Image (spheres, rainbow, N blue to C red):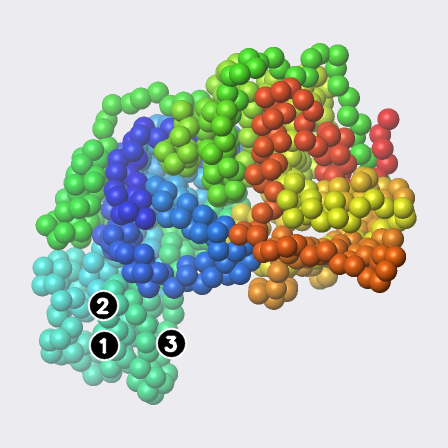
Amino acid sequence: MKQVVQNYKSGELAVLDVPVPGCKPGGVLVRTAYSLISTGTELMKVSEAGMSMLGKARSRPDQVAKVMQSVATNGVPATYRKVMGKLDSYTPLGYSLCGVVEQVGTGIDDVAVGDLVACAGNEHALHAELNWVPKNLYARGPDGLAPRHAAFGTVGSIALQGVRRGEPQLGEVALVIGLGLIGQLVVQLLAASGVRVVGVDPDPVRCELAERLGAAACGDPASAAVEAAVAELTGGHGVDQVYLAAGGGSNQPVELAAPLCRDRGRGVDIGKCRLDLPWNAYYEKELDVRFSRSYGPGRYDPEYELEGRDYPIGYVRWTERRNLACFLDLLARGRVDVEPLVSHIADFDDAVETYQRLKDGDLKAVAVLFRYPEQKEEAEAPAVAVPAVRRSGGASTPARAAKAPVRLAFAGAGNYATSMLLPHLTQRDGVELSTVVTTTALSAANAKRKFGFAEATTDLDAVLGDPSIDAVFVVTRHSSHAELTRRALLAGKAVFVEKPLALTEDELAGVLAAVEESGNDRLQVGFNRRFAPLLQEARKRFGTRTGPASLRYLVNAGRLQHGSWYLQRGTEGSRFAGEGGHFIDTASWLLEADPVSVYAVATSGNEDLQVVLRYPDGSTATISYVTTGAAGFPKETLDLVADGKVLRLDDFVRASVFFNGTVGRKRWVSSRLPKARDKGQSAELAAFIKAVRTGGPMPVPLESLVATTAATLAVQAGLAGGAPVTLARAR
């Protein structure tokens, strides 16, 4: 299928061939009929992409702050690779469309194949021939509603939410500053609510259009006509509400609003304009300034948008989905008319030319629609016990030609895969990147372009059935790791699964059942820290132990950004369940044993954890996993103490070993600072590829991977029970 994309680094726009997205549970696959270009938001993004790197930085200071924090945590080289990888990737455009349901995922019963739906979301309602859309981001179109009108659903919901934030009442007067697409819709919605509207825009054509659509009067912000109209309609008191629907860097809209608003009036910011509030003007009238956040309640909440968890109507009357359905109803009943706003309808194949004309000013438009081809193409198919590891009598090492390259497939191509794994594999001789599989088409296309995969698809079954593929990398979200690993093992593939291996005991049992059924134990979990060169050298310098050891591991994890999928505990497990295996594996490797018990305590809300592991020889490891520490402090520090010796690791940048000799004290310190924090990914991948190529043992014994996973799962059981959890070995 085809999709409109942009490279943010170069500014290139393209209509790209990408795989068809899979139809996941909890949503529908929609074939697009019309999609709407946001002449404000999208053109701003297109313009930013054409800026220099300095210009991009100036336009997004919030992203610059994140980069600086990443530098402090991960170092300059790793941050540079991450940032350049994101910039030099194709990103999607679009967030408002309508189309016909082509496939219905499990759990969906409110629409059927063939229904017309309006869809929202900058990750799901893209300028693409097919989109997978989760339940709370689509609404069925009323009978008789024209598809090109339903494509306005998202921007209509944005305007509707803005009006709701203003709380207009019958007979009031409102001022709408900015008569672009959103402003024109706000004018109509206010007029439909019995509010008289004055519009402001420097473009006389847009002013005339707004008056035809219900505004009482409109004019240029510099003219006296606007002030006169407000005085006449309000008896000199000023408007009850001001809606800021303008964009750009000018502070004029905010400065204009105050003198035209009545005492204790309301201002609502819908667009993205400069907001340097004139303090005296706003204070003297005690003006109420409000923000309208996109389509309505539910926006930016992954449990609502991705998991389909609705808010009870008695508590949240107007969610983003209800706003979407309401706007479609207003369209169908003729209370809002979007046909006069359609300045241009372009064929989807002409998308690049259309964007360029808009950017250059050759095409002056309020709203532009893409019209998609009518022909259809077939969519692609879419006490805790430590389990014993049992293998069948079958061969566990698939036969392969000795000198043939190791052919790899990737299930998932997210940030970790593209920044920490694939860059190492593309530089490695004897490796062939065969196929990348994702559920979203564009991420697969990006990975194919950047890393040289031969194929990109959304069909995992085809990959697992391909006998030429030697190994599958599972780098998807945590909730899918165990199932995808199980399927790949049953298909006879060697598997590299990024942590965690499993989120529940049942998932872990399912993986081991696949090992026993198939005899295929070719499995590696991405516990990379034991492969870090600095830690390997420090362990060598520390030498052998004769007595029990004490290990302290401080993980200054930091807080996650709002909206991170790591916070989706219902589906993705706790944060520690997702990444705690890293630290347990490192401790077990240093102590050369698997833990026999786990004790865990947490602060209120399970934000900060203390996990104590006990080992067979009496050694202990304490992992302090904290999210409330200082951002500037190193992320990982480790101390190992035994036999008069101390090993210290400082965030994979510096290591030291202190020990008592026959003559005084001795100390070894890493000779120089490495160029970057090397946490072992490259060495781990080299070991895995070697094992696949030669048929030798996997880098880490399967029994150790299972023990680490069981210990990680036991942390949650320990938190619930408030007592140590014994890790009993199953027989």
Look at the picture and state if 324 lies above or below 644: above
Residue 502 x, y percent position in the rendering? 67, 36
Q: Amino acid at mark 3?
A: Asp
In this view, the residue in front, 561 or 202, is 561
> Residue 461 at x, y = what percent?
51, 20
Dot 2 lies on which element?
A: strand
- Please state the horizontal and vertical placement of residue 599, each as a whole percent of the image: 82, 51
Give the residue drawn at x 75%, y 19%: 391
Q: Is residue 115 left or right of residue 604?
A: left
Viewport quadrant of the C terminus: top right
Disc 3 element: strand
State the count of labels: 3
Q: CA distance from mark 2 to mark 3?
A: 17 Å
* Label 3 sits on residue: 288
Q: Is residue 41 left or right of residue 688?
A: left
Q: Is residue 552 visible?
A: no
Tell me, for residue 256, which label it has, or none. Answer: 1
Is there CB contact under 8 Å for labels 1 and 3?
Answer: no
Q: Earlier in the sequence, mark 1 or mark 3?
A: 1
User: Which one is nearer the viewer's eye here, 50 or 206?
Assistant: 50
Badge 2: how crowded within 10 Å, few (<14), some, or many (20+)?
Answer: many
Where residue 556 sits, quadrant-wise, is bottom right
Q: Identity of the amino acid at label 1?
A: Leu
Q: In this rendering, is residue 190 above or below 547?
A: below
Q: Position of residue 608 (x, y in %)?
A: 69, 59
Left or right of residue 455: residue 388: right
